[in-house]
Image: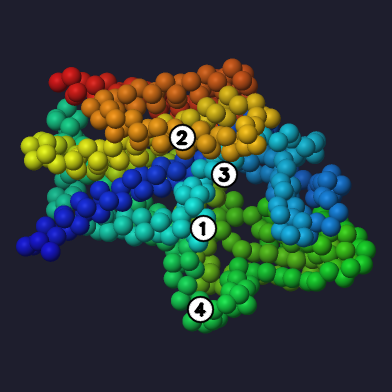
Amino acid sequence: MERTFTKSMAWLHTWAGVSIGSLLFAIFWMGTLSVFDLEIDRWMMPQTRLASAAQPLSLDRIATAVAPQVPAGAAQWRVDLPSAREPVLTLSHRDGKGQATSRLLDPTTHAFIPEQGTEAGSGFIFPFHYSLHLKWMDLGKWLVGVAAMSMLVLLVSGVVIHKKIFAQFFTFRPRKRLQRSALDLHNLTGVLALPFHFMITLSGLIIFITIYFPAAHQAVYGSGEKAKAAFSADAYGRFKRAKANAPGTLGSLDTMQARAEAEWRGGRPYFVRVFHPGDANSYVELRRSYAGEITMNLDQIYFDAASGALLHRFEAKPVMTVQRFMSGIHFIRFDHWTLRWLYFAAGLCGCVLIATGFLFWIEGRRASHAKKGLAGVRVVQGLAIGSVSGIMLATLAFLIANRVLPLDAALAGVARAQLEMWAFWLAWLAAFAHAWLRPAKAWSEQAWAIAALALLAVLLNWSGTGDHPLRALGTGLYAVAGMDAVLLAAAVVAVMAARRSAGRNNG
């Protein structure tokens, strides 16, 4: 503890930021991109750039198209219906061992779309945000939880140490020396998006409360697999019926949908799932869409597959509804384009907040560490460059690999989707190595590389698909046009940053 509370908070703010800043930036960066994960999917999967299907769709026609593609003995099959942001049908099915397979369909023709060979935004970027792709013992989620708690500490301590916080909101001196301008920008982005930072961090912790605080439900349900299953059934809803091991038929899904919509007072399903297909005890699940509301509701209705009789209906209890409301605030899966862009801008503010915090620490200690022969600045600078500009380069490498690799690409048994991810990891590793090998020039060189790769990604999309930004805009491919526009804007900002950094080095 320091002599005063404010100084103690300043010490805590400084060292919490330095120690967890790299992880925090990766989480914020991927979370910001995840606001438009489905739009990134459209950019990375050109054959899914379809016009919106006429509504309403016939579930019976869809079932007729997909049922022959489901292998005999499958435990279930499911079709996710198209939305304003995702214009394709997605068929997925599981075998008796739980192995999942999925394919995409055109909702108008019901023709299957060739395998796109990518995890894209929803399969790679979005899971990275909350799990870091570290699945062993939920290690990634625990690290994200530690980072979230650290972010709350940083926000509280930041408010404490900045006594003139509102005056600093109106103070930005970009032409001052780097340490001063970095602090001004740090304060500005921190205050500007302070409510968002609190909300997004706290809601992220609440989403995974069953992982971070299992004692809450174990106190009621106990521990063990049976207790866990009982909790899941009460919290998330689950209906099960054993197979009859006798042949059965599938009745009219459209009739079941109409019944569900009447029960939901006009709510529409976003997916339909058939359990035990072809069995006499087969049953159908419909889930209500939450595209028109903040809460990611858990409303479910189950029907007997043959007769269409209502078997079970589930709605979340009040406590779980609160959790799902916080999930909806965090994941923003509802349709609201203005809020979506505000989330994106606030997420970028978080990224700038973390990056400028690194810069302020480095510039404030550069001279004293050099004088004392300390290596701290060089270590932190390498971490900062690798985690800030490095992850941006890695993301661009991921996008470029997607545009360069053929759909059937494979290397030493590694499929195309994995090759794209390897491009990301290797580019990120190379950025860290470059940051430590060329500390004096790394910021400017990586900024130039970001500008070049962002422009290259736009050109590769244009040459490979013919969808340049103006054409995409004119044909209603707003997701593609938006992606290209953001990439071009990133290139412009990177050039400005590179010139500023080069000028400081030359000075």
Mark 1 secondary-structure assignment = helix
> Which of the marked residues, 1 or 2, is nearer the chain's N terminus?
1
Residue 38 shows up from this direction: no
431 horizontally vs 77: left or right: left
Q: Nearer the viewer, mark 2 or mark 4?
A: 2
Where residue 209 appears, as percent x and y from the top left, is 46, 67
Res 122 label: 3
Q: Are marks 3 and 2 in contact (CB under 8 Å)?
A: no
Residue type at the position of mark 2: Leu
Q: Which label was assigned to residue 352?
A: none
Q: Is 339 drawn above or below residue 311 in the view shown?
A: above
**Residues tagged 2 and 4 counted as in contact (Cβ below 8 A):** no
The three-letter amino acid code for the residue at tag 3 is Ser
Q: Between 437 and 277, which is closer to the camera in this rendering?
A: 437
Quadrant for the N terminus, please.
bottom left
Q: Residue at x 71, y 46 (%)?
A: 102
Q: Which residue is mark 2?
A: 426
Coordinates of residue 389 in the picture (x, y in percent): 35, 33
* Picture disc at residue 218: 4
- Say which residue appears at 47% left-offset and 30% top-offset: 396
- Going by the numbered disc 1, the residue's amino acid type is Trp
Q: Which of the two labelled residues, at mark 1 and mark 3, occupies the earlier sequence position?
A: 3
Classed neighbour count for the residue bearing mark 2: other residues with Cα under 10 Å, few (<14), some (14–19), many (≥20): some
